[in-house]
Image (tube, rainbow, N blue to C red):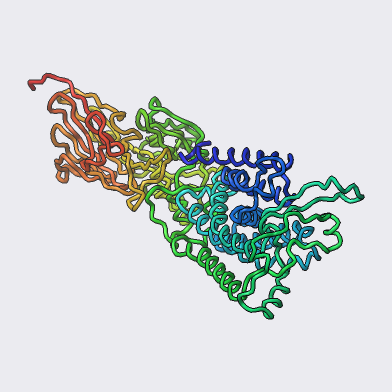
Amino acid sequence: MLIQPIDIFVYAWLVIAVLSAAYVAWDQFRGNPEPAVMKWGFVLVTLYMGPIGLLLYVMADKEPAPGTHEEFVKPLWKQGVGSTVHCVAGDATGIIVAAVITAMLGLSMWVDLIVEYTAGFLFGLLIFQALFMRKMMGGSYLENVKRSFLPELISMNCMMAGMAPVMVYLMMGRDMRAMWPGEPLFWVVMSIGIIAGFALAYPVNVWMVSRGMKHGLMTVRPDSSDSGEHNHSSSHASHQGSHGHGDMAQMNHDLAEQPSDHTSSQAKDGKAPAHSHTNSQHAGQHGEHHAGHGAPSVTRAQLTAVTFFSLFLLAAGMTLPAAFFNLRLSAEEVGGIIMPPGMIMTQETSAEAMRDMAAVDPRDVSAKYDLSQRGAHILEPRLENGVKVFDLDTSVIRWQILPKTFVNAYAFNGQVPGPTLRFRQGDRVRINVTNRLPETTTVHWHGLVLPNVMDGAAHVTQEPIKNGDIYRYEFTAVQSGTYFYHSHDHVDRQQTLGLYGALIIDPANPADTIPADHEYTLQLQEWLVRDGLTYPAMPMEGGMPNYFTINGRAYPSTDTIKMKVGETLKVRFIGSSSGFIHPMHIHGGPFVVVARDGETLPPSARFKADTINVGPGQRYDVIWTALKPGKWMIHCHILHHTTNNNVEHDGGGGLMMHIEVEGDPTT
């Protein structure tokens, strides 16, 4: 499923990487005169690096014409490619395996980096170097481990120094799907990290090949002149390609007895034997074959300097990300979430905060509704033994707020706002809430006097409702007026994403109702939508909203109220918004504020106004009289809130709707 625009690149890269690796495997094993370990090395590196690995293979190793491989691979830069490929193939394999395991175990990123380095180094040293290269290097397995240790350490240090910061930056930036192995983005980020590691390890591998410390590219061909019992081969070593890993213990001994500027005669003349006929299988069995017999041409000072410099690079690459990212986080905690653009995250940002601010995962959407579906429908109860019973269920839906704009919302009963619950003062009510969200939830009955256990405060008056569970709220309505209900678990996330609805309680005595010819309940909300993803809008960096809705619609898709001159309209303003105050204004004359927060104001306390600030959680009932015919607007007087993503449509947007009044224009 394409969730972000980057996903097009992600899938394309993975397909190209697989096809590139398939081609390299086919071409290598079809007849490229290369040792088997290097064949597999190029296949793995191409799988990890995609078209870059294919390019390296074609430019540095693929035999351009029969019999030309020896001459083709002579340049030192190509020898360096072969050495780096061999290093990366082993090290990256260990790193990738470790990354998957640590993610599945839920280990912190800083632990993950250490485990990845250790696994990459050991796999490269013990498997790809000491084991797979044993026939070329000769000697026992333990001897090969000793010979390979320092070159592998230097190369691995440089590789991980390049990989670590790139992986952390891409995995722990906005799109943390890259932390979870089940996401395609994880594999592309690993690929980019390996490319960075290859680039940093390449120069030091060129140097080690030139000094005889590591193998470069080699040529292996069947020897048609030998029909003996063994499978004979001719190892044609190109320029510098015959250098092996060198026995490091012997090298240190030789260096102690030689001048510091000693170089081998082979290194001085820059040549190697063109053909070194040997039975590689036989030699490997007897431990007599060495790819390079002379001591590596490197001084102790050079070796020490390069080793410590590689350690410095490693330390920088492993620790520098901690200054910018919270490396205590794990893939289990935040893997898969996507943060809003512009959100400021530091090493102090917790997993809980990230999950709270993250985008709704489109894969959790269970239903899609277009503009034909309206929110805030009156939910009719059923009667059970004198109790009015309402059923609410929460789910993730795709909800249309404008002709070309959808939001991924949390909804009650598949609508935003949730259904309006309306009953009478003195009624006994039961509300069954079934949770189908990917997280826990509760419901709070805002402003109502009821038993504490029914208040809906998560972890305070009840344990949150788990996915698939039902919680029954039951109480007697002792008040009347305009109220609303909303989530009270992860409230700044869930209410902002749509978990709210109107709750209207009519007075027990109908005479206490303030009459009006028309009635409209108006619920306010803000949305943050970027690149097709919906984030909870919050008054903080990166969380500011760019869409605003009345009853789940943005103007010009909001409702129109139709009236006649002289008629009255009762507007119930509900501050279902979670972080913003909205000064709501009605054109065409003042209104009278008759109730506040569910309490009817005595006649002496009522007042006229044309704008009233509706803050989060507040409710106002106002009576507006249609004095003149025409189109009269209701809108928020923060004018940015009357735009759609900063753009006006048909004279406005967002928190805006019309009252159409018919009548004699002369009145």
- Relative side of 318 to 242, left or right: left
447 or 365: nearer the eye? 365
626 or 406: nearer the eye? 406
Q: Quadrant of the C terminus?
A: top left
Q: Residue at x 57, y 55 (%)?
A: 198
628 or 221: nearer the eye? 221
Residue 175 rendering spot, x and y as whole percentages:
48, 48
Residue 417 rendering spot, x and y as whole percentages:
38, 36
Measured along the vertical axis of the image, is residue 304 above or below residue 292? below
Residue 298 rendering spot, x and y as whole percentages:
63, 71
Q: Residue furthest bottom?
A: 257
Residue 92, visible in the rendered structure: no
Quadrant of the rendered image containing residue 67? top right
600 or 45: nearer the eye? 45
Q: Residue furthest front?
A: 269
Q: Residue at x 54, y 55 (%)?
A: 199
